[in-house]
Structure formats: C-alpha cells, structure tokens
C-alpha cells in the first residue's frame, strides 16, 4: 500500500497534512492543527458558469444557492447555516466561470457533525419545488445589487461580446428573466434544469475537498471516507461539455470599445487572449511579464505616466482565466489629461513590451526572475497563518489547478528554471494589436474622437452603453514597427534593495507557541510626554518578521472639514511620493500603509503600519518617517495636482455606493462628533491649495502625541533604537489642550425612536435600504460579551427569516459595533421594497425573536455560549495580527490586552435570563428603554411603484437634512396587531439634533 501523499508546506507551518483519494475519486487534503480553535472545510467542484445552457443562463450560480437549502439527510432549508451560526461560524459559496466553491468555518469541536451535514450538499440535495421558486428572488436581488457596479458591467460586456454561441457569452449571475421567464417561454422547467445540471456536471471525481481541524489525520480521514463516500461519480472531465467550443475571441471581440460608466471614471484597459497558465505553473512565464510591466518603481511605465500627469494606477496580469483560456490585462487608471492621450499610452505600453522587455538581454530578465524566485521562496517559507475558512478555500481551489504535491505552494513558487525563449515566443505570439481588445472607459462627453456616424449599442443584461470600433491600422503599424523606439525613461526593474538577507531568529523571547495568550502583553519601553512605545519580542510564530504601528495624533485635523481635507491631501501625497519605495518594499515582503481613519479604534491623525521581514523593516521605517518629517508640499506640484484630482473624483463617486452604505453614513453623521460629510469634504477639496496644506502640515507636526506598538522578531533595544532614530528628523512639542483628541457620540434617548429619511443619491439604484442602530451604552466587558452572544444568535436567524423565507433582499445582516467607546447593535436590510415595509418586517422579526429566545433550550443556549467562548480563546495567527490587536487597545487608551479572554471569562457566567433581560432592555420593540436610531434610503423601485400607484412618498430631497423624533410609547412602524395611531414626531434639522443631544465622550 502506498503512503499517503504529503504536500510541501512552509517552514513555519507546524500543522500536519495528508492527501487522500476516495473510491469514488473525490480527492481531499486534510490538515491537522492541534492548536486551532476553529474547524473549517471547503469543496471546489470543476463546474461553473461556462456550462450554463443558453436557455437557462445563471444556472450554475443558482445551483450553488440551492445546495444550501436542504438535503435528504438534513432537509431543513436553513439547517446548515443555522448549525454554523450556533457554533460561532458561518458558511458561504461562490461561482466562477469554471468552478464553484463552498466553504464554512465553526468551533473546532463541531467538525464531525459539520462534515456529515456538508456532505449532503453533494450526495443527496433536495431541490424542492417551493424553495426553487422562492430562491429565484434571492438571485434577482443579488443581481439588482450589482446593476450599478461598473466592474460587473464591464466584465459582462467582455463576455457578451464574445463569439456568438460560445459559453463565455452567457450571463453568469442570472436573474428571474434568465432563470425563469426564458425557460417558461420555451416550455421547460427551471427545477428540472437544476436537476439535470447537478446530475450531468457535478461528479465526485472533479471535486476537491479541504478539511482543517484539531483531530489527527487518521480521524479526519475516517470521517471524510465515511461521509463523502456516497457522492456520485460520473467520471466527468473538468468543465464537462465545453472543451470543443473553441476560442471565444473572434475578430468582433478584438476591437476598440468605448464604454460609458455609471461612475465618473477614466480607464484604459488592454486585453490580450492567451492560453491558460495553469499548465505552466511550474515556470510561470507570464508572471515575469506582468511583474515587469506592472512594476511601479524607477523606470516603470506607471512612473512615466505619473510624471506626465496622465495616470494614477497601473495593473497587469491574467485577470480572467479558465481551464481553456486566459486574458492578460493591462489596466491604466487615467487622469483627465491622460484621456485624450490614450493612444500615446497604448504606444508606450507596446514600447515597453516589444522593445524594453522583449529585446532585453536574457541575462537581465534572468536576474529579475531569480530575484522573484528568491522572494517568493522566502515568503512561502515564512508565510503567516490566515483564517481557517480562507485557508481551506485556497487549498480546495489549488487542488483543482495544481499537482497534489503542490497543493499548498503551487500558486506561489517557481519550481523550474525559466527558458527565456519561451517568454519571447509568448510575447511574439500574443502581445500585438491584432490580438488585442481595448476598452476606453469615460463619460460620453469626454470620449475623444467619436466618429460622426457612431452607432452606440447597449449590452443586454446591464444596459451598458458602448461603441465598437476597429483598431486603426495606422496606429497598429506604428505600435509594432521594426523601427519602434523605447522611451528613454523606460527600463527593466533594477535590483530590489529590500530583498531580505537574514532569517535569524532573536533570542530572549518569553512568548512561545505554548504560552497562555491571556498573559501575552506588550511592555511600555519608552514613556515620554510626547512618545509612548509598547514592545513585545515574539518569536513564537517562527518567522523572521516584525510589525510596527505608529500613530501621530493631533486633533487639529478635526477642527473643520477643511482641516480634515488638508490631512487627506497629506495622506494621499505621502502615498504618492513614497510609492516607488513602498512598491519595491512590498515586492520584497515588506508592507507599508498610512491611513487617517480606523473603524476598530480611535484615530485622530496619521496611522502608519509597517510589517514584514525584520532585517529590512528599520530601513523602511526610517526612510518613510524621514519623508514625513521633511515633506515640502511646494516641491511636489505635479504630485499634488494628481492626488487632488483623484481625491475629488473619489468624493464625487461616493454617491454611487450601495444604499445601505448611505444609510450607515446618515447614522454616523447624526451621531459622531466630529463628522464631516462627503459633500462638505468635496466642497473643500475642490478649492484646497498647496500653500494651505503646507501650512497645515507644519501645524500638525509641531504638536504630536506619538503612540507605537512593535511586535515580532526585534529586541526591545532594536525597537527603541528604530523608533528614536526614525523620529530624530522631527521637532515637536506636547499637545496643547485644544489638540488633545476628543471624540463624542450622540446619546440616543431611551425609549425614543429617531428616524432619518432620504432619497437615494444614485437615481439608477433600484434598491432601498434600512439601517437600524440600537445603542447599548459604554463599552464594558460584560456588555460586550452579552452583545456578541446576542448578535451570534440573531444574525443567522434574521438572515434565515428575512432573506431566505421572506425573500426581502440579498443583503440582510445583524452585527455589533464598538465606536468611540460605545456599544451598539446594527440591523441592515437592502431590498426593492420601500423602507417603511422593511422597517415593519425588522420589527416583526425582533418581536418573534423574543419568543425564540425565551423558548430556547438550556442545551442550545449553552452550545451558543461555549462556541463563542471557543472563538474568543482563538490564538493570534501571526505577530502581525497580535500587533493589530495591541494597537487597537493602545490607541483607545483602554490597554485591555487580554480583552477577548476577559470576555470569555464573563461569557462563562452569563445565564439565559441575563441575555433575555439584555434583549428586553435594549432590543425588543416592547422595550420602554430601547435607544433606536433608524435610517431609511428610498431607491428607484420604491419610487416608481409609488408613482405608478398614483401616490406620493413622504420623503423628499429636503428630508435628508432632517431628523424625526418619536416620543416614548409611539409606534411609528406598527406590526400586525398594533395600533397605527401615533403622535406627530418632533422634526429637527440634522444640525439642531447634533447640537442639542446629550453625548458620550472619549478623550485620549
């Protein structure tokens, strides 16, 4: 008997692996991790959208939905989701062109039961008639959510214009029209199509399973063999039935497409169809091409385009790929000046490809490839753990693409020497104008050189307007001329100065993999009025890496909307002037980022994050901090204008966010102090000057409180030296009283319902949205424990009732929030139904949940508690994650480094009666002390429906600046059986409400 196959794993990975194949030919990779608090599994099947019938487009995606809705072993329609939720986990799935992936995560002691349930997806699904009809509404809602998304619209255009009758041409998401109305017109049944697809496209031999748990490999193998043995094997090849369809890229596809976006966007994309890259993953020849043309350092195409003021971003690589083909994409995000020069940009692309790269000495390209190989090898050897469900998802997908022994390392490593002649052949054969499709994406009024007789077309599914034109032969001839010269500022990437040169692990760490994480905390090693440095030498993850967070605090950044924009411009300018250096560092495994906000903890200034190999981390930190200390805005006029234009565009396009995002922003504006709206920021950004930003920068740097956390493979002495030397170029004093960060949150009155209404800012958005914010109170350990436990119980129940049973919409969620030191519960629904109807359904659900909670058995309650305790005791997966957690505590000035363990301790004492009392006080519609703020956004469908019925909505454009306050006892949205009588609300302007309400205060 042959030994089980064991894939290569990272040096820092202490888990054990085994790959097995069942008698039905289903392949599984097993992973045993005795330390994990979570178990996870994923299954990838080599079947997807390319197998959709023209008659039932979106069928593969619809099947993915249906497999969650019951099987012969566990027929309950929400059984699997509810099981995962009650075990502190969740489940999800996605469908691509050539594969469908199902995945989940939950408490480690539930793995066996979960595999039993999960296997039923693939061995005995029900596809019940009533659920089939009902779930079509979820598909429709999901599609509605995507209709205004430009990336979705452009990808479907890429597909819809493929060769007639080719599978690529089909509509992968699906909607009611494609999945129900079209089949009905042709006299066929959607459910029967589902059954046929499952029987003819799903087979054990093209399924790859990944399992991760605490159990040893023998135990896992026994479970997998038992539970998955009944998955039928039809001996299918991957993507069964599509191999003979030929290329989808005919001459009609290889054209110039002028595309009109929803948002204000300017983008140039070049597409070059190529063979799929999975067959050559051991050498990865196209990775070298994408690395060079997508490089952002000195000599790069992007560097030149930025210098000219034509572009802000450039990406290159195989963005679209399947078993039978791939599309290499070169995408350029244009500035206004770049749009009329798009042909020159295309010329520069070909100059780089065909001259700079293609004609380079093979030895020069070998040097680059060797450097890539060295860095990828280092990154793989010392890879950090990721979330268990993400990891099993990766492993299952990898098994569909790579040899079994390369299931972990296949996507990353270079296994064999590169023959540069092969690269030359690829460039010569595929990277030329006759094999190119070009998208020029911009508002119609800005599209250059539109022919007078232009015939605009409309894509069927998303209604995207586009114009199809031939590639001008004159331009194509110039781009490929034997005399083509390369711009003198374009050259291949130079050697990377950040390539790691040491993997030495420091001695003296008191933290080991066996340490009780509750006792693991950083030490304050620099304690000055203007500088606080916390440090932890941590080699427990066996990685030569470290992480450093540095926050520069000064509340002058929140004095006004203009001050906030000054900080935003400094932030964007830092990104721009450090981009080449930061890019090279990131290519070598060192990541730098700077932000001016944080959703997890208070941030009033600039927060800088550095993480990666310890040997070069101090070099990067010192250089970036020197840039901030010495930044002269006046010396970077070109960069300033570039980032200003990009920032203005960002604020203009925020009206096209999903409507639930607008609803959340409306809550934030009413409750957060300070708060500056997107409209206020846009107004200031349009007129901001370099001189103002330079003056503000001087003020910001003159007074600061610097707070920092450093965790990983750096000693206390090295950390202190790095910090002090990096800050040496600065000269600053302590914060004056007015510049000490003070953040406040409106206190929603108990028993009162506050309502804010608005029309969707995006007139094309069909969905409406409701966000209900239930304010709990100050963030204390017991409150946090009760809130998280309640949220765990409510989330899937709410999803199951409002999304699955009532089919209100695709987006339904329940989540806890901890903002400015205050706890709250947020309920969210997005749907084509009007907000008032959604509000009633939410209140009805909460009323019903009262009974659900009261009747819950002690056994089920204890199971919820234990699974959440297990989740809270989960160890950090990396020093990076540990540093993030510590920094949140430091910047919030709470310093509860064992917070999650303290919550676990409180959970162990919580009773069912405690939770019921908590629910009745803060959440139940019957509560007289509930503090409720609800935000409504009305979308196009609700508006149109009301107009067609001859009615008028109460909401007007002026409503957005008002707040309606209903007194205690009022029932603004009565559920069935409640009286509809209510007193008139008190109407305040948003300014009055913010000014007069009581506040919670957080002072740093």
Image (cartoon, rainbow, N blue to C red):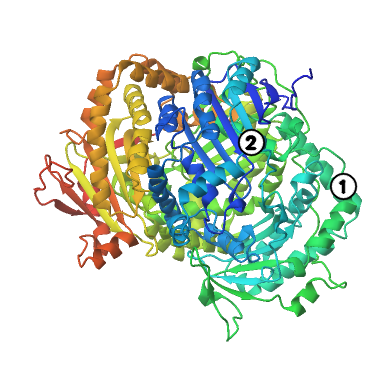
**Above/below status of 700 relative to 907:** below
Which picture quadrant has residue 440?
bottom right
Element type where label 2 sits in the image: strand
> Is 453 or 1004 nearer to us in this picture?
453
Q: Which mark is residue 366?
A: 1
All told, the count of numbered labels is 2
Sequence-first disc among 2 and 1: 2
Residue drawn at point x = 42 percent, y = 61 percent: 682
Residue drawn at point x = 74 percent, y = 27 percent: 7
Can you name the residue that lies furthest to the front here? 187
- Crowd band around label 1 with a 10 angstrom C-alpha radius: few (<14), some (14–19), many (20+): some
Residue 699 position within the rendered picture, expressed as x and y whole percent measured from the top left: 47, 49
Residue drawn at point x = 46 percent, y = 47 percent: 191
Please identify the quadrant where the N terminus is shown: top right
Q: Give the spatial CA distance, label 2 vs label 1.
A: 38 Å
Lateral position of residue 416 relative to residue 256, left or right: right
User: What residue is disc 2 on?
Assistant: 207
Element type where label 1 sits in the image: helix
Nearest to the eye among marks 2 and 1: give it.
Answer: 2
Residue 73 position within the rendered picture, expressed as x and y whole percent measured from the top left: 46, 27
């Amino acid at each position: 008997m042959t030994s089980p196959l064991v894939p290569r794993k990272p040096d820092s990975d202490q888990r054990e692996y085994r790959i097995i194949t069942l008698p039905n030919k289903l392949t599984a990779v097993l992973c045993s991790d005795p330390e994990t608090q979570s178990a996870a599994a994923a299954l990838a099947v080599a079947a997807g959208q390319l197998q959709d019938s023209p008659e039932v487009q979106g069928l593969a995606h619809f099947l993915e939905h249906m497999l969650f809705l019951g099987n012969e072993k566990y027929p309950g329609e929400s059984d699997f989701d509810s099981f995962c939720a009650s075990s502190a986990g969740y489940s999800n799935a996605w469908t691509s062109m050539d594969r469908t992936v199902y995945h989940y995560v939950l408490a480690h002691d539930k793995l066996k039961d979960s595999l039993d349930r999960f296997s039923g997806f693939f061995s005995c699904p029900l596809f019940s008639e009533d659920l089939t009809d009902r779930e079509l509404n979820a598909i429709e809602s999901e599609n509605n959510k995507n209709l205004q998304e430009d990336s979705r619209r452009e990808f479907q255009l890429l597909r819809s214009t493929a060769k007639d009758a080719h599978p690529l041409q089909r509509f992968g998401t699906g909607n009611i029209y494609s999945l129900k109305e079209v089949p009905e017109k042709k006299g066929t049944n959607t459910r029967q199509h589902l059954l046929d697809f499952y029987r003819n496209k799903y087979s054990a031999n093209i399924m790859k399973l990944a399992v991760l748990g605490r159990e040893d490999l023998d135990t896992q193998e026994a479970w997998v063999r038992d539970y998955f043995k009944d998955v039928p094997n039809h001996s299918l090849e991957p993507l069964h039935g599509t191999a003979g369809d030929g290329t989808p890229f005919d001459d009609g596809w290889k054209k110039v497409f002028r595309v009109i976006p929803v948002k204000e966007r300017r983008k140039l994309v070049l597409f070059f169809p190529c063979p799929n890259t999975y067959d050559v993953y051991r050498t990865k020849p196209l990775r070298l091409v994408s690395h060079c043309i997508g490089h952002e350092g000195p000599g790069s195409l992007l560097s030149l385009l930025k210098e000219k003021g034509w572009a802000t971003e450039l990406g290159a690589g195989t963005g679209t790929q399947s078993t039978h083909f791939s599309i290499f994409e070169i995408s350029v995000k244009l500035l206004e000046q770049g749009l009329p020069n798009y042909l020159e940009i295309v010329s520069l692309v070909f100059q780089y490809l065909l001259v700079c790269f293609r004609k380079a000495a093979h030895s020069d390209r070998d040097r680059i490839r060797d450097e890539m190989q060295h860095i990828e090898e280092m990154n793989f050897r010392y890879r950090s753990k990721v979330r268990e469900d993400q990891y099993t998802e990766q492993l299952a997908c990898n098994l569909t693409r790579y040899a079994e022994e390369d299931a972990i390392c296949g996507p990353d490593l270079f296994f064999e020497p590169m023959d540069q002649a092969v690269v030359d052949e690829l460039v010569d054969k595929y990277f030329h104008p006759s094999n190119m499709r070009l998208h020029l994406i911009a508002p119609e009024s800005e599209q250059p050189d539109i022919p007078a007789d232009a015939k605009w077309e409309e894509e069927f599914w998303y209604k995207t307007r586009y114009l199809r034109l031939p590639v001008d032969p004159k331009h194509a001839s110039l781009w490929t001329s034997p005399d083509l010269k390369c711009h003198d500022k374009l050259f291949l990437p130079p050697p990377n100065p950040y390539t790691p040169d040491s993997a030495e692990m420091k001695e003296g760490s008191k933290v080991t993999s066996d340490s009780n994480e509750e006792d693991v905390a950083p030490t304050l090693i620099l304690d000055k009025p203007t500088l606080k440095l916390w440090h932890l030498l941590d080699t427990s993850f066996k990685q030569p890496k470290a992480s450093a967070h540095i926050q520069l605090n000064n509340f002058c950044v929140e004095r006004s909307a203009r001050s906030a924009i000054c900080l935003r411009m400094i932030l964007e300018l830092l990104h721009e002037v450090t981009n080449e250096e930061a890019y090279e560092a990131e290519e070598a495994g060192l990541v730098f980022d700077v932000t001016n906000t944080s959703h997890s903890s208070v941030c009033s200034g600039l927060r800088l994050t550095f993480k990666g190999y310890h040997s070069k981390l101090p070099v990067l930190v010192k250089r970036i901090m020197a840039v901030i200390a010495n930044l002269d805005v006046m010396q970077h006029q070109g960069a300033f204008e570039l980032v200003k234009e990009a920032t203005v565009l960002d604020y203009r396009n925020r009206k096209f966010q999903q409507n639930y995002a607008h609803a959340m922003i409306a809550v934030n504006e009413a409750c957060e102090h300070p708060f500056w709206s997107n409209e206020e920021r846009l107004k200031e950004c349009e007129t901001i000057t370099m001189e103002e930003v330079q003056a503000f920068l001087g003020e910001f740097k003159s007074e600061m409180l610097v707070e920092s956390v450093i965790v990983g493979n750096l000693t206390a002495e090295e950390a202190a030296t790095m910090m002090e030397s990096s800050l040496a170029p600065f000269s600053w004093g302590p914060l004056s009283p007015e510049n000490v960060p003070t953040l406040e949150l409106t206190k929603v009155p108990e028993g009162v319902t506050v309502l804010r209404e608005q029309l969707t800012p995006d007139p094309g958005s069909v969905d409406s949205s409701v966000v209900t914010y239930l304010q709990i109170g100050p963030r204390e350990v017991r409150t946090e424990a009760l809130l998280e436990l309640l949220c765990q119980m409510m989330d899937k129940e709410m999803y199951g009732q409002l999304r699955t049973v009532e089919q209100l919409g695709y987006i339904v969620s329940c989540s806890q929030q901890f903002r400015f030191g205050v706890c709250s519960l947020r309920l969210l629904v997005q749907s084509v139904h009007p907000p008032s109807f959604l509000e009633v359904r939410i209140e009805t659900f909460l009323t019903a949940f009262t009974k659900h909670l009261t009747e819950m058995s002690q056994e089920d309650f204890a199971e919820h508690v234990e699974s959440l305790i297990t989740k809270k005791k989960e160890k950090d997966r990396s020093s990076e994650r540990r540093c993030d957690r510590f920094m949140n505590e430091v910047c919030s000035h709470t310093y509860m480094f064992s917070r999650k363990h303290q919550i676990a301790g409180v959970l162990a004492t919580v009773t069912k009666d405690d939770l019921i009392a908590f629910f009745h006080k803060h959440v139940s519609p019957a509560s007289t002390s509930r503090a409720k703020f609800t935000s409504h956004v009305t979308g196009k469908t609700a508006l149109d429906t009301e107009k067609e019925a001859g009615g008028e909505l109460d909401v007007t454009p002026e409503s957005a600046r008002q707040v309606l306050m209903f007194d205690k006892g009022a029932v603004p949205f009565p559920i069935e059986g409640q009286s509809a009588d209510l007193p008139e609300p008190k109407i305040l302007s948003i300014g009055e409400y913010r000014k007069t309400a009581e506040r919670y205060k957080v002072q740093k």
